Image: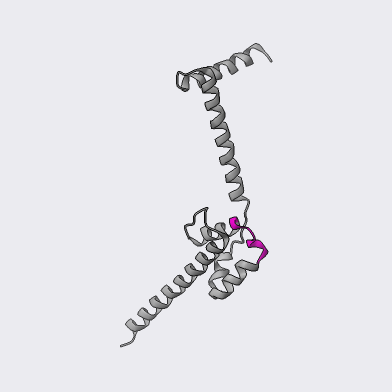
Amino acid sequence: MKSHELANILELTSKLLRSLPNNDITHNINHIQKLVNNSAKQEIQKNRQYSINLPDDISDKLRTMSTQEIETYLNNDTLFVSTASIQKLAEVVGIQTSKRQSRSALINLIVRHHEATQMDSIIRSGSKSEKETP
């Protein structure tokens, strides 16, 4: 290592230490370590979320199925073996979920959402046909 490289490292270290509270150096180093660990955990979680690839036409495919077909499909298809993949599907469909929900609860939530969407479209088409009839 050259002297100018060491000077740059010491300068960065100085800036880092100035940005922290004026505490004992071991306390500040522990604080930095916690920040690094939290950052690494968040990076791992981001990578896990994006590693699940669903087909682009999955929401269109689900719209053409009945509720029983959707439930069977989600329970038996190899693409939806994990809870994370079901959660990703719910996100794609537009349903807010919780990380604490079980796989079966997520499947039930998607099926109920599909039923509600179908009911809404039936109601909307029924009200349009009533307006058109003299």
Residue displayed at 61% across by 48% down: 48
Q: Is residue 133 left or right of residue 49?
A: left
Q: Quadrant of residue 1?
A: top right
Residue displayed at 47% across by 72% down: 115
Q: Position of residue 101 (x, y in %)?
A: 52, 57
Q: Position of residue 42 (x, y in %)?
A: 56, 41
Residue placed furthest toward the bottom: 134
Image quarter hosting the C terminus: bottom left
Residue displayed at 59% across by 37% down: 40
Q: Which residues are magenta?
A: 77-84
Q: Quadrant of residue 65?
A: bottom right
Total count of labels: 0
Prevailing SS of the magenta stretch: helix
In the picture shown, does residue 57 fall above or below 17?
below
Q: How is the image coloured?
A: one colour
Q: Is residue 115 left or right of residue 39?
A: left
